[in-house]
Amino acid sequence: MDKELNDKVIDFSKKSLKIEENLSNSIFKDIEYIKITKDENGNSFKEETLIEFAKRCFYIVTVVKNNGITPALYKYKVPFEVLLDFLNGFKNNQSSGKIIDIERYVPEDLA
């Protein structure tokens, strides 16, 4: 089942990027990833541009917490600049709850 799901994710990525030869599958610390070297127009990425774009985005992090009576969902709007610190708070048990979803939000003027 996991292989079937992975194949669907990889196939979806290839279809959406339209440049199959720019994808290579690899594994790092038991996590599969896809390396993309060019955009769908065949242009190489510019690191500074990607980082500036990311800095203008933020992430909606959904956390489930159970305060003894009933579980509740908390949605946090987290700027890019503090995302790793925010996530580390849960990893290091400094924050309560379990992260169940992370969604990137791109402001309308960037889309």
Image (spheres, rainbow, N blue to C red):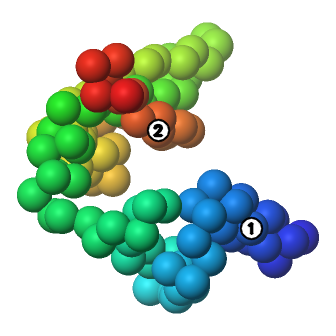
- In percent of width and height, residue 36 lies at 44, 73
Eyeballing the image, is 54 above or below 92? above
Tell me if residue 32 can be seen: no
Tell me if 94 is positioned left or right of 21 in this view.
left
Residue ID at (21%, 53%) = 50
The residue positioned 48% from the left and 61% from the top of the image is 40
Disc 1 + disc 2, Cβ < 8 Å: no
Can you say whether 15 is above or below 59 in the image? below
Q: In terms of secondary structure, where does tag 1 sit?
A: helix
Would residue 28 be found to the left or right of residue 101 on screen? left
Q: Amino acid at mark 2?
A: Ile
Residue shown at 47% from the left, 35% from the top: 103
Looking at the rendered structure, the kind of residue marked 1 is Asp
**Residue bearing the label numbered 1:** 11
Q: Indicate the quadrant containing the C terminus: top left, top right, bottom left or bottom right.
A: top left
Residue 102: which disc? Answer: 2
Neighbours of disc 2 within 10 Å: few (<14), some (14-19), many (20+) = some
Q: Is 12 situated left or right of 84 in this image? A: right
Indicate which disc, 1 or 2, sits on the residue closer to the N terminus: 1
Q: Secondary structure at mark 2?
A: strand
- Picture quadrant of residue 35: bottom left
Task: Work out whether residue 95 can be spotted.
Answer: yes
Determine the CA span between mark 1 and mark 2.
22 Å
Image coordinates of residue 106 in percent, x first then y, are: 35, 28
Q: Position of residue 25 (x, y in %)?
A: 57, 85
27 relative to 5, above or below: below
Is 94 drawn above or below residue 20 in the view shown? above
Q: Position of residue 69 (x, y in %)?
A: 61, 11
